[in-house]
Image: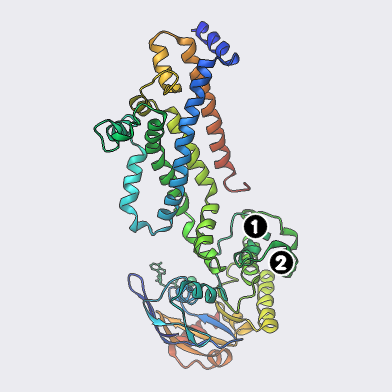
Amino acid sequence: MLEGFMEALRLITSFDPYLMQIVFLSLRVSGGAILISTVLGVPLGAYLGMKPERKTRFVSKIIYTLMGLPPVVGGLIVFLILSRRGPLGVLGLLFSPAAMIIAQVFLSLPIVIGLTLLGIRSRGGDVAMAARTLGAGPLLTVWTVIKEARLSIFGAVVTGFGRVVAEVGAVMLVGGNIEGHTRVMTTAIVLETNKGNFGFAIGLGLILLTIFFVINSLLYTLQRGGEGHF
Amino acid sequence: MEGLTKRYSREVLNIKHLAFQRGNIYGIMGPSGAGKSTLLRILNLLEPPDSGVIYFDGRPLSDNGRERLIQQRRMTLVAQKPVLFQTSVFENAAFGLKARGYCKRDFRGKIELLLEQVGLRDLSRQHSATLSSGEAQRVALARAVAFEPDLLLLDEPTANLDPSNVEMIEQLILKLNRDRGITVVMVTHNIFQARRIAGQVVFLNEGRIVEMGETERVFTDPADPRTRAFVEGRMIY
Ligand SMILES: Nc1ncnc2c1ncn2[C@@H]1O[C@H](COP(=O)(O)OP(=O)(O)OP(=O)(O)O)[C@@H](O)[C@H]1O
Ligand SMILES: [Mg+2]
């Protein structure tokens, strides 16, 4: 146990190439997924959040359900779509980083949409009205609403990133955990633990924990500072 | 406006005819739920009426989005519960001018002067979330008049304010009306306030106009029994 811990610290401080490669792939995949989710999810969430609640009730329920989708199930769906016989099989994306990004978009997009929607619904209508009384056209109105909800939106993005960077099921299914190609932090932890390679697994665990500490610090600051300046 | 109606779950407005003359100050009065705020929102083109026509400058409102925005930009509404943007007082006051494409260099002095007039000069950099309610109300008014609208719609601009704030806001309204000929339509529950600044009053009850006329005449000799009850009821307290 202690031995594993020492080994982990050695790997991290020596920037072990195998370890670093995995960490960077993880960040690239989850970062790419959250980028796509943000670009698609924030405008969509803003649009839904500005519509009257009763008109979006059904869509909202679907989004909330997808927010809690177990990663393996999301991975399974993307797997079926991308597999050789699936509708997008011709693209040959399965077991590639692109497939993992698609699967993680599937998991993080509902979170970004859902949390943006909630953040905008609370104040969006009033903000839009205020902007319009002051002569804002449609574009500036939407932009103002999004800007006013920036704290919630930032929180939505950070939460979404936290979810995908930590999930194993989906990336394992559609990525295949191929060394040097689709092996990310979580799948590497599973593998190395099974091999008895605890030092390596603990090292990755520590890095993941650090990432989560940063994410939660951000969220904590956001919630505390939400009332004041930003 | 002609033959205007508005329904939510029930009919909340039914106005056969209502005209505001340029350069006057109107007080809109009536019990809670009479439809006063709804009327202002419709006048500001924030919500469409279910039927009826609104004329602005003698012409019906345009169906064309761009032209309508131009018409909408000549008026403004200060809501009953103003929503300030989460930024500085200065940026709040500058919003309307920015929306019209002016650049900061050109309006900085103008905004500062305006903030001084409403006693907010020293708060220019302060974040809106930290303002008292009286200060917030004054920011909302300053923000609305910064771009010199022709028609100013005010929804209870001085409710819940202390006398010095009331005085400051009333003075600004009167000054804008006097100097720039700005037309003001103001919802108020306060008869004394209506008498102080409104030349004309409109009484609204259950979405209908009960009485309209010169302020003094309506208060001293109301034609409608409901207005009379309202006026006399208030005078006792
Ligand atoms: N968006 C809405 N949806 C449904 N009903 C509404 C809506 N807005 C207003 N109403 C209803 O319309 C009626 C008139 O509301 P309005 O806010 O215009 O009254 P008001 O005269 O301004 O009252 P107050 O003096 O209390 O501000 C009320 O019965 C209100 O419940
Ligand atoms: Mg009202």
Labels 1 and 2 in the same subunit = yes
Q: Is residue B218 above or below residue A26?
A: below
> Residue A166: which quarter of the image?
top left
How many callouts does the rendering have? 2
Q: Which chain is home to disc 2?
A: B
Separation of marks 1 and 2 at Cα, in angstroms: 23 Å
Q: Is residue A40 left or right of residue A132?
A: left
Residue B56 visible in the shown view? yes
Confirm or reject: label 2 Cβ below 8 Å from ligand 2: no
Residue carrying label 2: B107
Q: Is residue A227 left or right of residue B47?
A: right
**Subunit under mark 1:** B
Q: Position of residue A196 (x, y in %)?
A: 41, 8
* SS label for mark 1: loop
Give me the residue at 43% from left, 50% from top: A45
Q: Is residue A160 visible?
A: no
Amino acid residing under circle 1: Leu
Dot 1 or dot 2: first in sequence order is 2
Q: Nearer the viewer, residue A24 or A83?
A: A83
Tell me which residue sits at (50%, 8%) in the image.
A4
**What residue did someone put label 1 on?**
B131
Between disc 1 and disc 2, the foreground one is 2
Q: Is residue B169 above or below residue A92?
A: below
